[in-house]
Image: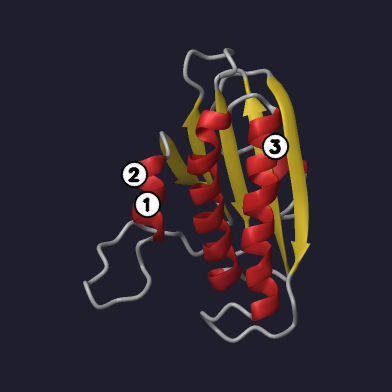
Amino acid sequence: MTAHSPERLAQSPAYAEPVLDELALRIERGPNRDGDTVSEDDALWVGRLRRIGAAVVARWGYPGLVESAELLISELVTNALRYGADDAIAFKLVLAADAFVIEVDDGSPGRPRVREAGPDEESGRGMLLVSAVADEWGVSPDGTCTWCVLKIPQAGQPS
């Protein structure tokens, strides 16, 4: 089973079945990677996926969750681009009966953690934001996929 296979991604969070719809994309990363730095070309994917995710969540009938989904997508995709090990990143947005699930698989076994960044640090707050906005979040057993869940208010009732 490859790191980006549907079977691998399905191991992530527990949410109520059935899956009603989903969007899955594979992003090929550019060759200009330098440690923790994200190239300008790769950084464009953060905005693209925010816009795609916002459009999908709104299309699914939950415009009240768009801003939260955009923030979560930004943080998870940025982390994947910055720290991921693979040449590609798998992005998945799932509409389940009671929640949205955002999954980002970067091929890196390194696990993100919530930390408190100092007042002069320019980064380091991403997972703190994820933990504050998402109803739950976690990492797959092999550490390559980070996921988060946004519960749908009054499950099954679009706003």
Residue for point 68% across, 72% down? 42
Sequence-earlier tag: 1 or 3: 3
Q: Return the residue at label 2.
A: 132
Residue for point 75% across, 39% down? 23
Q: CA distance from mark 3 to mark 2?
A: 22 Å
Using the image as rendered, state which of residue 157 and residue 143 is in the foreground.
157
**Tag nearer the camera, 1 or 3:** 3
Amino acid type indicated by mark 3: Val
Q: CA distance from mark 1 to mark 3?
A: 22 Å
User: What is the crowding at mark 1: few (fewer than 14 residues within 10 Å), some, or many (at least 20)?
Assistant: some
Secondary structure state at the residue bearing disc 3: helix
Q: Quadrant of residue 117?
A: bottom left
Q: Return the residue at label 3.
A: 56
Relative to 24, is 74 on the left or the right? left
Q: Is residue 108 above or below residue 56?
A: below
Image spot of residue 159 (x, y percent)? 56, 19
Secondary structure state at the residue bearing disc 1: helix
Sequence-earlier tag: 3 or 2: 3
Q: Quadrant of residue 62?
A: top right
Residue for point 49% across, 64% down? 110
Q: Return the residue at label 1.
A: 129
